[in-house]
Amino acid sequence: MSALPFSELAARIRARFPAVAERMSENRQPWLLVPAADLLAVCQLCRDDPELDFASLCDLTGWDLLRYPAQPPSDAIVVAYYLHSLRHRHHLTLKALAPRACCTLPSVSAIWPAAIAFEREVYDLLGVQFSGHPRLTRILLPEDWEGHPLRKDYAYPAAYHGVPHARAGQWFEDGPARAPAGAAPPAGGAA
Amino acid sequence: MSSDLLIENQHGERMRLSMGPQHPATHGVLRLLIDSDGEVVSRAVPDQGYLHRAIEKIGECVEWAQFVPYTDRIDYVCAMNANLAYCVAVEALLNSDPATAVRVPRRAECLRVIVAELNRISSHLIAVGAMAMDLGAYTPFLHGLAQREAVNDIFEKLCGQRLTYNYVTIGGVAFDLYPGAEQEIASFLDRFEEEFRRFNQLITNNRIFRERCAGVAPVSAEEAIAWGLVGPNLRASGVDWDIRRDEPYGIYGELGVRVPVGRGYAGARGRVGDCYDRYVVRLLEIEESVRLIREALRLLPPKADKPSDPLGGHQADVGKQLRKPPRGEVRVRTEAPRGEMGYVIVSDGGKQPYRVRCRTGSFSAVGIFEHLMRGIFLADIVTIIGSFDIVVPEIDR
Amino acid sequence: MKAAEDSIVTTAVDEFLAWGKEHSLFYLLFATACCGIELMQTGGPRYDVDRLGMIPRATPRQSDLMIVAGTITHKMASRVRTLWEQMTEPRWVVSMGSCANSGGPFSKWSYSVLNGVDKYIPVDVYIPGCPPRPEALIDGVMALRERVRRYRTLGIRDRDPYVVAGHEAPFGSHPGKEREATR
C-alpha cells in the first residue's frame, strides 16, 4: 500500500530483466525502454508482482519517430504503455520500439484486456502489427483504407471510392459525384 | 458487403442484425453487429469509426493554441472539460522546463472549476436523460434539456457559444465573468436543486425503470480495472478513484471532492456495477458538482478594478513559451464527465505539437461491450449502451 | 420538366397536399456529431419544433426530411446515401452545420472527412455555423417549408439550394416572410 518511486520500480524490473534500460525524456520524464523480446514477460511481471501491482493499463499509444529530432535519428514507431496501480497509486511508463522494416510487437491483450481496443487503434493509425492479438483489424478507418495516417510520411489520398477528397469543383449529380475536369460548378452547388 | 445485409438468416435459427450506424439508441453513429438466437444475444461486436475525423492528425498540423477548438469537437457534450484537459496538459509540458514555466492566475483556476463543473452537470443530464429516453421514458429527457438550456445561457453570455466554447485557454481562460454572473450561477444552482428533486421523483425511483436496469450487465471491480473503464463507469463498480481527488489538478485539491461509488443501489435485485449503479453514480456526481461550484464561487478572488496585467488578470501570457516549448513529452490525466481524459503530448520544440494523443472514457467503454453483451436479452443492449454514456466522437475522435 | 409544368393543370388537390406536407415535416432522427445536440435541443422544451409539425422519426421510411446534423466521414457517406434512398418522395435534405456543408474545420487537414454531404445527396437548404443555433435551424426549416409549399406532383420542385443568411437573404428573413409581407 505504498507508492514506489520510479528508481525502485525500475530496479525491481531490471533485477529480473537486465536488458530493460532506464531512460529519461528531454523534459525529465522517466521511462523504461523494453526490448520487444522481453515485453510480454515484463508486462506480466508488472501486473502480477504484488509490490508493483499494475492492474490497470491507462493508455497504450504510439508515435512515429521519423521526423523527431532524436539522437541518434531513428525511423522506428514508439509504442508507449502507461501503467497505473490503483492499490499503490504509482505510475510507470514502458516503451517499446517497432522498427519500420519489421513493424511487429507482441500483443499484451492477454494481460490487460483493455489493450484489445488500444492495440487495434495503434495498428490502424500507425501500422504496428501485434502478434497474438485476437482480432487485429482496422478499428476507425474502413477496411479498405490504404496506409496508416499517423505515420509522418503518410500521403493524403486524392479520392476514396471515386469521391475526390478536395472540395473545389464538386457537386452532387444524381449519384456520388464524379466531376469532369475543368467543368464549372452549377450555381449555388458549392455554397 | 455481405456483412452489411440488414438481416441474414442462418439456417433459420441464428440471426445477424446490424444495429446502427443510424439508430436512435446508439447515441450517434456507433454500429453493433449482433448475432442473436431469438431474443437472446449470443454475440455483439461493436463497429466504430463512422465519425473518425482525424483530430489527432490535425493536432500535428496546427499550432499549440489553435488545437483548443478541436478539443471542443472531441467531446461536445462537455466541451469545457475537453478544453481543460488539453490546456492542463500543455501547461504541464511548459512547466516541465523552468525557462518556459507558466503560472495560471488563481481567478482563472476558480473559473475553470466553475465552468467545468457546470458542464459536468449538463453532460450528466444528457447522459441520464438519454438513458431514460432509450428505455422509453421521454419526459425526463426533456426536463434534462430544459436545465441544460439554462447552463447554455450562462455559457453563451460568458463566451458567446452554446456548445463548442473554446473558453479555457492555455494559461487561463478567454474571458472574465460578465457582470452579475456570480448571482446568476448561484440562483441557477438553487433552482436546479429543486428541479433535480423533481427529476428524481419522475424517473429514478420509477419501478419500471429500476427493474429494467437492476442487475443488468454488472461489471465487477476487477473486470472494470482490467478493461480500462474510467470515470463514473469505474466508480459504479465500487472502485473509489477520482482523478480530481487523487491526482488533483488546478484547485481541485483544495475543494475536497467527495467521490460516490456504486453499492448496488437498485435494492434486492441490484448488483454492484449494474446499469442502475452507473445511472445513480452520475446523479450523485451532479449533486457533488453543485457543491463544488458553490465552493469555487466562494474561493473566487475578487476581480481587480484596474488590472495591472494587460491581459486582464484571468490569462497568463504564454505567447513566447508556445513559440518555443520544451522538447519532450508529458502525460496528464483529467477527470471529464465520461471519465479520464488523458493527453499524451510529444513536443519536438516546434510551434506545433509533434503528437497529440487523447485517451477518452468512451473508447474503453466500447471495448468492454463485446465482453458484456453475451447471453443477454436484445432489449438490454439499449440499457447497456445508455448506462455507459458513450459519446461517439469521443470513441472515434 | 418545363413542358410538363405547362401541360398539366394543377388543381386545388395538389395545393392541399402541399399544404399538408408543409405542416407535417417529419424529420429523420439522424445526428452524427456536435450539431446533433443542437438538433436535440431544437426539439427540446425551449425551441420546440413540434409546434411546426416536425416530429422525429427513427426510420427513414416514415420521414420527409433529413437533417444532416454533423460531420460525414468517408466511412459514413455511403450509409447516408442509403438512408436518403430509403426515404419516400418527396424528400428534402437540410445540411446543418459547416461540416455537412463543406467539411468545416476538418476540411483542410483531415484525411477521413467528406468535404460536403452534397457530394452524395442533393441538398435543399444549407445552414452555416459550427454548430448553428437552433434559431438558424428553424430559419432554414421555414425556408424549406416555402419550397415544400411550391412542390407539385410529378416532382416539380425548386432545384437551387437555399443558404441561410446567404448574401441574398439577410439573417432572420426568408422567402416565406417576404411572401407574408406582400400578401
Image (tube, coloured by chain):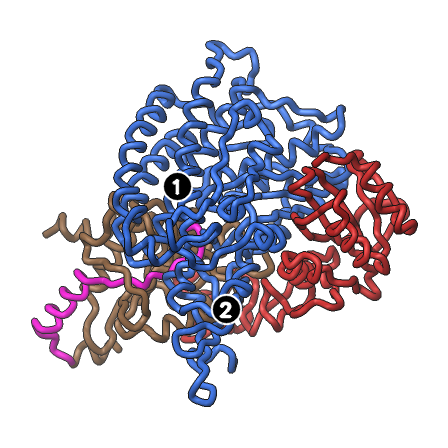
Chain colours: A red, B blue, C brown
The answer to whether tags 1 and 2 share a subunit is: yes
Residue C9 lies in magenta, yes or no?
Answer: yes
- The residue located at (10%, 68%) in the rendering is C16
- The residue located at (86%, 42%) in the rendering is A22
- In the rendered view, does B202 fall on the left or right side of B266? left
Quadrant showing the C terminus of chain A: bottom left
Front one among B239 and B321: B239
For disc 2, the chain is B
Q: Are marks 1 and 2 in contact (CB under 8 Å)?
A: no
**Image coordinates for residue A92, horizontal then vertical, percent:** 75, 43
Give the farthest residue toward the left: C12
Q: Dot 1, how many residues are within 10 Å of its Cα: few (below 14), some (14-19), or many (20+)?
A: many
Question: Alpha-carbon distance for marks 1 and 2?
Answer: 28 Å
Q: Dot 2, how many residues are within 10 Å of its Cα: few (below 14), some (14-19), or many (20+)?
A: some
Query: Could you say which quadrant of the image residue B179 lies in?
Result: top left
- Residue B371 can be seen, yes or no: yes
Give the farthest residue toward the front: B268
Looking at the rendered structure, the secondary structure element under dot 2 is loop
Q: Please name the amino acid that badge 2 sits on.
A: Arg
Label 1 or label 2, whichever lies nearer to me, is: 2
Q: Which residues are magenta?
A: C8-34
Compare marks 1 and 2 and give the one earlier in the sequence: 1
- In the rendered view, does C91 fall on the left or right side of B355? left
Front one among C109 and B109: B109
Q: Please name the amino acid that badge 1 sits on.
A: Leu
- The residue located at (43%, 32%) in the rendering is B288
For disc 1, the chain is B
Front one among A84 and C150: A84
Disc marking residue B374: 2
Q: Which residue bears the numbered disc 1? A: B283
Quadrant showing the N terminus of chain A: top right
Query: Could you say which quadrant of the image residue B326 lies in?
Result: top right
